[in-house]
Image: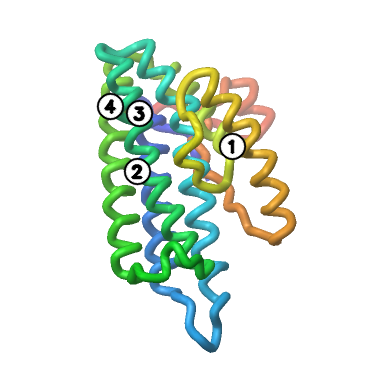
Amino acid sequence: MNDSPEAGVDVLADTITRTYAVLHARMRSAEACRPTQDAPRAAYSAADPFLASTSRHVAAANAVLVPAARRRLGQGHRRAHEFARQSRRLEVALVELKAKLYGSTYAVRRTWTSIWDEVEEELARMRTLELRLVDDLAAATSEEDLGDLAERLYRCERRVPTRPHPYLPHRGVPGRLARRLAVRVDRFWDTAEGRMIPEPVRPPRSRDGRITQYLLADPHFPG
């Protein structure tokens, strides 16, 4: 199967769009599988992939996309601040979901409907903000650099925290240090709990050169 991007395709925007489609599908799956008295832990296996993949994507976007926007876009610092603020709002909603899922007394008075409504609303806001940021980056960045950003985002997403951390720094050096510390703690607990962490959405690979095509027996002849 040839998964090379077609000419003129914005690899970064395509990757972000597909990522949010996956997150939305995992959210719906988790929402449909709520804990019951007979099976109080049944919802964990459905909710954990959504919590982990969403937390990872938010952290990776702050590590890769926000610095690029700050450097390349007009009002980049304001855009970075806006992105970090929305990241925290989504992560707070995810923390509330996790608290409700695990029976925390802090969330006992909240209904499942209110929890999921908040998560869905903040995820939709995050998607809108991120796609707008990516569209503006596309206007200020070469196609090759957009592909590089998409690949960096994918690699970063595989090594960032797997749980929401709304009250840790998100930007700059403090953000990088906080993520390094949080990912070690998260990995320990993921291993202890046997938590399943999904693979992030991978950007389509760039079109190989002719020698590579020959060696792989995967030629791409011009139309």
- Check the image and report above or below for 32 versus 200: below
Q: Secondary structure at mark 2?
A: helix
Tag 2 near tag 3, CB within 8 Å: no
Front residue (pair 223, 20): 20
Between disc 3 and disc 1, whose residue precedes?
3
Residue that mark 4 sits on: 135
Q: Which mark is residue 89?
A: 2
Q: Identify the amino acid type marked 3.
A: Asp
**Residue plotted at (42% across, 64% down):** 107
Residue 204 appears at what percent x and percent y? 49, 36
In the image, which is nearer the foreground, mark 2 or mark 3?
A: 2
Tag 4 near tag 2, CB within 8 Å: no
Between disc 4 and disc 1, whose residue precedes?
4
Q: Identify the amino acid type marked 2.
A: Arg
Residue 73 appears at what percent x and percent y? 30, 14
Between disc 2 and disc 3, whose residue precedes?
3
Q: Give me the C-alpha separation between circle 3 and circle 1.
A: 24 Å
Residue that mark 1 sits on: 160
In the image, which is nearer the foreground, mark 2 or mark 1?
A: 2
Tag 3 near tag 1, CB within 8 Å: no
Q: Answer yes or no: is residue 2 visible.
A: no
Residue that mark 3 sits on: 10
